[in-house]
Image (tube, rainbow, N blue to C red):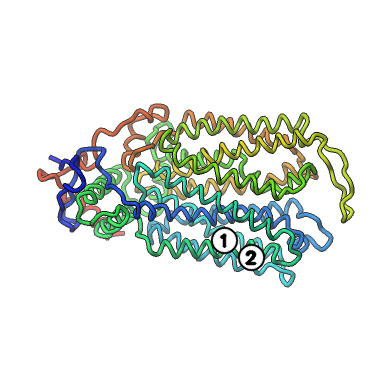
Amino acid sequence: MATNLDEKPSEYPITDPHANGGHLATTSNVENIEAPVTWKAYLMCAFASFGGIFFGYDSGYINGVNASAVFINLVEGPNASALTSPHQSLIVSILSAGTFFGAIAAGDISDRIGRKWTVILGCAIYCFGVVIQMITGPEVNALACIVAGRIIAGIGVGFESAIVILYMSEICPRKVRGALVAGYQFCITIGILLASGVVYRTETRTDTGSYRIPIGIQFAWAIILAGGLMTLPDSPRYFVKRGRVADATRALSRLRGQPSDSQYIQVELAEIIANEEYERKIIPDTGFFGSWMNCFTGSLWDGKSNLRRTILGTSLQMMQQWTGVNFIFYYSTPFLQSTGAIANPFLISLIFNLVNVCSTPISFYTVEKLGRRALLVWGALGMLICQFLVAIIGVTVGFNHTHPGPTAADGTATTRADNVSAVNAQIAFIAIFIFFFASTWGPGAWIVIGEIFPLPIRSRGVGLSTASNWLWNTIIAVITPYMVGTTEGNLRSSVFFVWGGLCTAAFVYAYFLIPETKGLSLEQVDRMMEESTPRTSAKWRPSETFATVMGTTSAGKLDPKLVQDVERRGSAT
């Protein structure tokens, strides 16, 4: 019979500290499979979210750098007033190309060297890329340097963006996992805001500091993240996957703020080991190529199949990019400048970033109160309404209706909006759209991809999902200048019809395909996806623990063979 864990924490018995040979206590109570957590442990789990800072900063600073007169003259020549569409597209999108490959590679690397060391390696690669970007100047080919530096930095960002989500999902307590992982998105928004502020302060400089200062500040984020992670333990689930049960015990003890010989720790570790063995019966070890193919096994129509989960993760990140949010953060400055209705486009861009930052913390509460599924469904509805309103106002009386303005001091022609109030209304609805995105799809997509994959394919599944995010980020960054460029598509406000239609697709997608994972351990999410559908998942409740399913002794300990199998398999890889 399994050990009863309904007593008060102070009354818990102490078990054998050696997490091997079957000395792990178990429970049949599905609510007591996770150790309670101290505030120190919460802070340790939350620190990893700092990785979002340089993800966001790297995405945000390029908007202002591309508008820097000094940088434009270095790339296009002394008489140029703006980057050409091909060059703008290349500079913005090349980072995403690097992150795509970095995210795919990161999954395998994190299974070999660990989650935290993969992120630290990503920080080192990122710094190398920043050094190359800093070289950009009149002495060298400016375009070649900025492109080469951004693709290398992108590989580092790919490592970080995939593995920080994986690391946080694996170490965070289940009842606040969504809120803590949402902190990653919050840090992304802070990074974008910091980039906007730095660009705002350097835009009037007439030397290379106008773009080198925004680029150089990136060093700080990588150093802080790498330095902090060196003091934190790696993921206990990574150690279990590698067969290092003793290391998993020590890591879990630090993360939960409990003694390693506490029954709390023993029970949670037993559940992780039992789930690993359960999943291995379904997804056996098959070597490097076979393990990649495991991500695509099963039927598309089977909700619990690996193929279905991989498609869910990759398509969810695709949908996040389809909302059009990065159009605003990548191209808002030149787009708003084209209307002539805005006295200071950089200031409006800064306001958008403030809305982004201030709205994201709402998700800390709502993602655990309302759940992931409800957040994504209602968020998509709010976004599609805003996008269509911006488009309709623009094509009738707003952005699309301008007249020639006075000639600028440098002799270039300018335009002015016919109806400034209509343009202001469009800007207001863009800000409301950002509110809906930042409080729902921004964090929600990252939370879900970290929860839906079983341990044997989790690192690759999260890597593929993150790579999908960056692939679509790249595609949108490449095509957007041609969609809105005055010499190409020149869609102007009509581009928001495109984003509105895609937000409609995201609404339908979330309603039919997104499961509810709120309040479940990662191991329970596996069982939920086997036994329910997305639309019934919110009502699903666990009925038994994996330790009970896989086998316990009469003394309430985990079957010793399970622990031995995990350790033996880990030593062979």
Residue 539 vertical placement versus 40 (above, below): above
The picture places residue 300, in percent across and down from the top left corner, at 44, 34
Residue 86 vertical placement versus 358 (above, below): below
Query: Which label sits on residue 133?
Result: 2
The picture places residue 62, in percent across and down from the top left corner, at 65, 55
The picture places residue 391, in percent across and down from the top left corner, at 70, 32
Query: Which label sits on residue 153?
Result: 1
- Identity of the amino acid at label 1? Ala
- Identity of the amino acid at label 2? Gln
- The residue drawn where x is 35% and y is 59% is 233
Q: Are marks 2 and 1 in contact (CB under 8 Å)?
A: yes
User: Residue 395 is drawn in which quadrant?
Assistant: top right
**Residue 48 in view of the camera:** yes
User: Residue 227 is drawn in which quadrant?
Assistant: bottom left
SS at circle 2:
helix
SS at circle 1:
helix
